[in-house]
Amino acid sequence: MYKNRVKVSLETLSHSHKGVRYMITNRVIGGSFIFGDAEKQKFLNLIFEGMKRHSYRLLDYVLMDNHYHCVIEIDPIEDMSREEVLERWYLPQRAKTPREPTEEEFDKFNKKIHDISFVVGNFEQRFVQWYNKRMNRNGSLFNRFDSVLIEDGRALAFIMAYITMNPVRAGLVTDPADYHWCGYTYRLAKGKLDPHDESLVISLYNSLNLPKQILKLPVKKQLTLLWKYFRIRLLRCNLKDYRSIESGDNRAKTLKDKIEKEGNSVEINNASHFLIKVRFASKGIAIGSELFVENVLRGCGKVLGYKREHHAHDYHAWDHIHTLKKHREVFC
């Protein structure tokens, strides 16, 4: 149900990468605004609970009224010990004497809990079951989700910034720190999103131009500096752009609207460019350096059904970040 050619191909590629990151995007069927506070809390609880049941980490997220984005990291199968796999096998079994899996069952289960399609499908299905029972309804609730393979470093930084700015683009808040249902605010309140958050210091070190001495500091201080620089390097100019937009029915909804309404010729800087390309962020299949995207093509081209030779496309607005699919130069 949840698998398609793209998702299967990305999953097969993941075995050759350390800590594969995916951006997951999905919308409610028909664009219905079904996510109230109770629904968002339940959905978030299921994602966090899934980390104990399967093999993934939630690196970032934002929950909107009719859709969500999240960044999920899945490690290679060989990185999980047999004991850790068995711990997950026994977890859902409520019997007093749980049955040990056969070797065939063990291998199948191990692959399943490392499969991005199964991981996302599981917490979505569990939410749908909860929601349908609560609302006395039947049937599907979500569309088929989009998954994008993200390279470590600059591409990951831009995607996290794009996710963080979702509620600002929607006009819900003027500062993402004021929006409760996103990873950025959760980190500000809780200190970190996941016990492995310190790995992001290494991942984003060069992209955010973090101070060299940060790696010598205690983890808590590392994370405090990380999110301080994340805001300074990627969010500051965008917050200024959106705060300067007038309020009311005539409020400009995009950066293009803002430029046209003010009648100015504004040169958009690199840090602002990630705001103007929603389609690029959610439909690119793979986002990263030219080498990264070319490697995805070599590993997945045939599975994706490409009959002619394809190459990575340079998206100049993102400072030479490449994508597998070419996109039109349009504003969101």
Image (cartoon, helix red, strand yellow):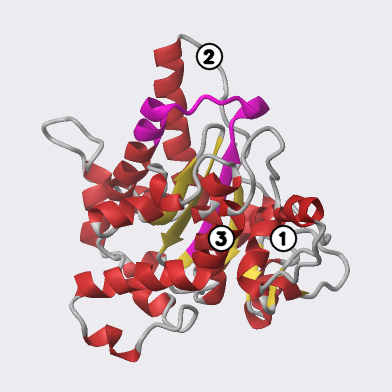
| Residue 173 rendering spot, x and y as whole percentages | 49, 43
Front-most of residues 96 and 143: 143
| Residue 282 rendering spot, x and y as whole percentages | 65, 53
Where, by quadrant of the figure, is residue 59 drawn? bottom left
Residue at mark 1 to residue at mark 3: CA–CA distance: 43 Å
Q: Which residue corresponds to mark 3? A: 240
Magenta segment: does it hold 134?
no
Mark number for residue 138?
Answer: 2
The amino acid type of the residue labelled 1 equals Val
Q: Which residues are magenta?
A: 21-43
Mark number for residue 303?
Answer: 1
Q: Residue at x 30, y 64 (%)?
A: 80
Mark number for residue 184?
Answer: none
Q: Residue at x 75, y 71 (%)?
A: 267
Label 3 SS? helix
Q: Is residue 105 above or below residue 30?
A: below
